[in-house]
Amino acid sequence: MNIIHLLILIPSLTYAIVYDTGATRCDCGFNDPMKDTVWQDLWYMDFQDEQHSQQLYTMQDLFFANYIIPPKYNDSYPRVFRKDNVEIVNNAIQIAVTINETNSSDISCGGFGTDKHDFLYGSFRSMMKLTHVKGTVTGMFAYHPQGEIDIEMVSALQPPEAYFAVHPGITTNGRASPLTHGEWVFNFDPSEDYHEYRFDWYPNLVVFYIDDVERYRMTTNILSQPGRIMFNHWTDGNANFSQGPIKEDAYVSIKNMTFFFNSTESSLHCNSTQRACEIKDVIYSLKNNQTSLERATSSVAITTAVTTTIPTTMTSSSSRVTIRYPWLLLILLYVRYYIYII
């Protein structure tokens, strides 16, 4: 098995797509049809393509968990996060929960997050393959000291379950309230292949997806502060959640991360295009290693004027298109058709 420490490979294997050197082809944002919203930026990291030349996100853009979280409950043990538990393995970033060979009670966890900590609303997606080992929790979440948005997958349950939560949470009669907690039972084995895990974060709404299908939504206690995006893999022996201890090393693999988002520093320039790119077309381009975004921008090639209104946080994708020179439009359509025929 080819295993190389992330410390060595991040500069050469990871990249973020910023089309045409600086997102110039999509500098008018990314259209989210689910909520008639435009996200201002794209953050993309992929660990499969060693040949890609656009190295824009490197080691300095991630931090690696190297700390201890004390036990929270009776009979549980600390979560000991070590940066060495995050590696590149088989073209994926791998997060391990490991057992000390000489002391099975010495268990180490792993995690990492974006150094960028001003994400403020967006659509956050990751392709992950979970562990088959019972007794761990895989987390993907937005974090701010005042709150979180969590997707957590619990391997101890059979079939495995995904838990969705926002913090601070609400409890009713000592139990987690469905206002801030939800769950979904997997109808497939998440350890056999990669699947997409996603949450769309809006003001006063979070929608959770697995494989592009909505699984839960919440409108209570939604985080309204900018934060970072984090991934972790852990166990603490809590009999009511992670369970454990594990009997063998456990691994979670992440193939890529795609974030369409706003931030406290985001702004739209609309210099190269005058209309937002479609998210579905951007995803298609990313999957097919197309960095020119021709598919995503082709629909706006003949637009002559667009009027939009852009608030500072979320922006509406609805716009008024004005064709000032109809005869020019006909010529352009004819030229495109003629080129296509040739």
Image: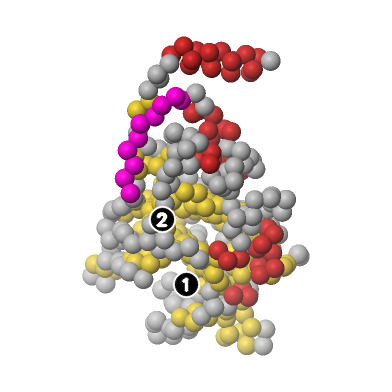
Horizontal side of residue 259 vs 90, given as left or right: left
* Quadrant of res 150: bottom left
Estimate the x, y position of residue 13 in percent, counting from the top left: 68, 58
**Figure check: 18 above or below 66:** above
Q: Residue furthest left?
A: 173
Say left or right for 33 vs 27: left
Q: Callout 1: helix, strand or loop? A: loop
Q: Is residue 90 above or below residue 301?
A: below
x and y, in percent, of residue 135 in the image = 52, 72
Query: Residue 298 magenta-drawn?
Result: no
Numbered tag placed on residue 228 in the rendering: none
Circle 1 is placed at which residue position? 242
Question: 63 or 247: which is nearer to us?
Answer: 63
Location of residue 146 (image quadrant): bottom left
Q: Count the marks.
A: 2
Spatial CA distance of label 1 from label 2 is 37 Å
Q: Is residue 222 visible?
A: yes
**Camera-nearest label, 1 or 2:** 2
Tell me what residue is drawn at x 67 percent, y 88 percent: 102
Amino acid at the residue labelled 1: Ser
Q: Residues within 10 Å of mark 1 (few under 14, many from 20)?
A: many
Query: Where in the figure is residue 3, as x and y percent of width and height?
Result: 73, 67
Instruction: State if disc 2 and disc 1 touch (CB < 8 Å).
Output: no
Which residue position holds label 2?
265
Q: Residue at x 53, y 35 (%)?
A: 296
The magenta segment = 303-312
Q: As rendered, which of 263 and 72 lies closer to the eye?
A: 263
Mark 1 vs 2, N-terminal side: 1
Provide the major secondary structure of the magenta segment. Answer: loop
Residue located 43% across and 83% down the image: 71
The residue at the point 44 percent across, 76 percent down is: 239
Res 209 visible: no
